[in-house]
Amino acid sequence: MKFFRVIAFDLDGTLVDSAPDILPALNQMMVALGKAQVNLVQVQHWLGNGMAKLVQRALTGQLEPDCCDVAEFHQAQELFIRFYRQTNGSQTRLFDHVPDVLAQLSGLYTLALVTNKPRQFTEPLLRHLGIEQFFQAVWCADDLGKAKPDPQMLLALSAQQQVPIADILLVGDSENDIFAARAAGMPVIALSYGYNHGQSIAQSQPDLVLESFSSLPDSICCLEQER
């Protein structure tokens, strides 16, 4: 048996349900631009690739936007940032069992957060939800200018912690997490309940798919026994 040394977590869709906070901010942005509002299911499908991509998807109504007016995009992004500062944390909730499992794992491993959410929203949210103390490292997409599925944040985490990439396990909820982990060369566990563009996460072939966060400690042990 070979133990993992670091467990890295995605944030939105893995630890927290943040779509109810993002929806009103996006709709305030859309109203300010004279555009039709969006709904919660659309937001859930659009999350996962960072703020810029989310704004582009809202402006175009497309998961893979063909094009976007540059000036309108920059205006929209500024509006979204302003409105999301007001809503961030107001309706976001931790998924079931998250605090207890993080507390349990923090006594056994170094825990890290690797998220596509900008740092200006990540740190206040962690404090608001009372889970910031569990993470010894926090990497956000704007730290490096690279969002998952790019593996750069995971590679930076490995270098920062001086831990081989194969000794880090990623826990996420979307194909972006799976692709980033595979590109970095690390194992990955996926939660089935998160944001994955409306598709089953099993299609992206993580090492394990979990229905509940409470299953994570036992699942980590299973992977360690196979190493």
Image (tube, grey):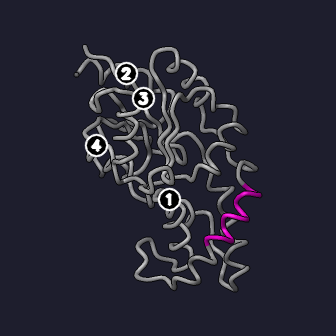
Separation (CA) of disc 2 from disc 1: 27 Å
Residue 8 in magenta?
Answer: no
Visible residue check, residue 213: yes
Give the label on residue 184, or none: 4
Label 1 packing within 10 angstroms: few (<14), some (14-19), many (20+): some
N-terminal of the pair, mark 4 or mark 1, is: 1
What amino acid type is highlighted by mark number 2?
Arg
Measure the C-alpha gap from mark 1 to mark 3.
Answer: 21 Å
Who comes first in sequence, dot 4 or dot 3?
Answer: 3
Does dot 1 land on a helix, a strand or a loop? loop
Q: Which mark is residue 50?
A: 1
Stretch of the chain drawn in magenta? 77-87
Q: CA distance from mark 4 to mark 1?
A: 19 Å
Identity, as a three-letter code, of the amino acid under mark 4: Ala
**Residue at image mark 3:** 7
- Specify the label residue 5 is tagged with: 2
Q: Dot 3, crowdedness within 10 Å: few (<14), some or many (≥20)? A: many
**SS assignment at label 4:** helix
Residue shown at the point (76%, 50%) measured from the top left = 90
Pointer 4 and pointer 3: residues touching (CB < 8 Å)?
no
Q: Nearer the viewer, mark 4 or mark 3?
A: 4
Measure the C-alpha gap from mark 2 to mark 4.
16 Å
For the C terminus, give its image quadrant: top left
The residue lying toward the viewer, choosing from 11 and 121, is 121
